[in-house]
Amino acid sequence: MTAPAMAAPSGGNDLARTVIRLARRNSWVIGLWILLGLLLIFTKSILPNFGATGINNLTLAALPFALATAGQAIAVLTGGIDLSIGSIMAVTGVIAAKLMDSAGDEFAVLVIAVALGAGLLMGAINGALIWFTRVPDIIVTLAMLFVWAGTALLILDRPGGEIADWVRSLIRGTVAIEWVPRALLFLIVAIAIIWIPLKRSQLGLSIYAVGSDRRAAIRSGVNVRRTKILAYALTGLFAALAGLVVAMNTGQGDPVPGQYLLATVAAVVLGGVSLAGGTGGLIGPIVAVFILRLVRADLTFLGIDNSFATVIEGAMLVGVVMLGAVVARRQGQS
Amino acid sequence: MTSAQGTVGNERAGWTTLSFWQRIMRDYPLIPLLILLGVLLLILQTQRPGIINQIWLANTLKAAIPLAILAACQTLTMLTGGIDLSVAAVATMAGFVMTTQTPLVGPVTATVYALLAAMLVGTVTGVGVGVLRVHPLIMTLGMGLVVLGFMTVYQREVLASGSAVPDEFAWLGSGLTEGLPNSLLLIIPLAALVIYGLRRFGYGRLLYAVGDNETAARLSGVRVWQVLIVLYVISALLAAVAGFMYAGLIRTVSLDTVNPFLLPSVAAAVIGGTSIFGGRGGYAGTLVGALILTVLTTLLIVLNLPEASRQILFGAIVLGVAAAYSRITSTE
């Protein structure tokens, strides 16, 4: 066949090929979206009046988990893990609540900036300690879990403070039409502003490089120290957003860290991010958060014991990971 | 933890010259640990003269022993490069099943039920890690969630029948004989078995082999999956024993009795010099690590520090010891 004859149909072929390639590369995330869609249809079928309000409540409940999971995903992408995520959330929550209470509403923007800055700083300290001490990530963040939890208690020894009403309204209610919860918009904006430009930057590339093969990354001139510190700072920033959202939701700051750690690790893994680092993204884990929340809600609607939700969450986590391992091995053999 | 092996690659590289302290830390990790323990005791004694007496010693040992048993689970799993985050859930389950079944079927059968349940959990975890190759962190995390969920359901089922801690476990967990805690009767043979077993039994050596280089172990004919299944069953059984001890110590069991000890159990093993990447460490260090953590907790309380500073110092010291290990034993 001659070259011009090839050229004619290749426009359509290229498109098809690109679609197939994209679908294959993102098959896990597409599967998650389909699962989420099926779960929504299922929810509608068992609860006919599940609608805009239901979506709104679901998003509001999922928001802190989604933000914390985004942070955890970044740490895991570098091949690490951040066990201190719940404590960082607690610190930013109490900072925001305490400062806003004493400074007044007009300084709320400044207070939010301070809280987010604190998250960045705490994350950067985690990353710097990991590099400096040469202790594994999991051990460093385990120790820092206690340090940051203590810091939260130092700032506020019992739940208190206050979050300005207009800040709280940022994640409450809906935008334009009743089907778009503000919480969802908040999440999308946060991811779009922080992660999307980063992923395409040099830092984003370095994060994936360090996660997939540290030694190769070093030899290709990636600055591992800088990457680790900045990646953990980003994790801290997302944790700070999550802590802020928890405080916005309750209207005050709670120095005792919530149970976010296991949930974020579960969602990260379900979301297709390998614990070995280097593969996956942020969208998958966030969709996984919504799936896990929706399963929990559905079980409540069905009148099934809430603690079975924990059983199912654990079983899903293990089952999906096993499935993923088996699929990966099949692909590796073929 | 394949990803992380790169970070410690240099630790094993070294046949280069080591300084005196590096050699001490590497060959006799117990010595610096015991020095640290001594320093902590010294600070305690100067801060509150006369506090270290027999009663204090007995109480400290009573608190440290269940932690040391939980930390044994972490030591053994960490030797193969794994970790067991389900120990708190399994210990809670065992303690809870034992105490709630005792009024119904008597203490002996109740204990057997609890041990069987723990074996079941350990087998599932072991199959997941060993055969289906799920990352131990994920597998044990998931199993922990499953177990705790089932326990919450079970709790409602048995609420009416009440619970009782059998006298034998209360005696073992919190009783004293001649001023010494009875739980020493459990920990001394157990510790001797684990320490000796890790050094001399074939199975103990297999754990190091698998953790040091799994591929090499497999190529030498080790059936790695069998080693891992047995390992997680042992870990679950040890966790169950720790659960019994906590039941005997605290005298009641609720579903969050053991949870606060999960992360300290990892910390005790790490402080004791067991590498989370596998192949290096042992139980003797872990025992001292559990003691150090317990003494540290009392010290921070005695110093009259607020809860906040206590937590910060606790974290800082755990990190400091871990960092000292990795700095001194690395040969860059």
Image (spheres, coloured by chain):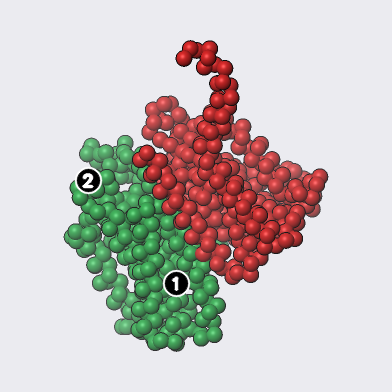
Chain colours: A red, B green
Quarter of the image for residue A29 reads top right
Q: Residue at x 24, y 54 (%)?
A: B223
| Towards the viewer: A284 or A125 | A284
Is residue A44 rendered to the left or right of residue B16? right
Around disc 2, counting alpha carbons within 10 Å, would you say few (fewer than 14), some (14 to 19), or many (20 or more)? few
Q: Residue at x 65, y 37 (%)?
A: A192
Q: Quadrant of the C terminus of chain A?
A: top left
Which of marks 1 and 2 precedes in the sequence? 1
Residue mark closest to the camera, 2 vs 1 = 2
Is residue B156 rendered to the left or right of residue B226? right
| Towards the viewer: A61 or A298 | A298
Q: Is residue B93 above or below residue B108?
A: above
Q: Which residue is mark 1?
A: B93
Q: Residue at x 48, y 35 (%)?
A: A208
Instruction: Count the numbered circles shown.
Output: 2
Quarter of the image for residue A253 reads bottom right
Q: Is residue B138 above or below residue B16?
A: below
Amino acid identity at mark 2: Leu
Task: Give the Cα separation between the discs numbered 2 and 1.
Answer: 38 Å
Dot 1: chain letter: B
Q: Which residue is mark 2?
A: B219
Dot 1: element:
helix
Quarter of the image for residue B36 reads bottom left
Amino acid identity at mark 1: Met
Q: Position of residue A224 (x, y in %)?
A: 45, 34
**Does any portion of residue B60 appear in the rendered image?**
no
Q: Position of residue B131 (x, y in %)?
A: 34, 54
Q: Position of residue B33 (x, y in %)?
A: 32, 57
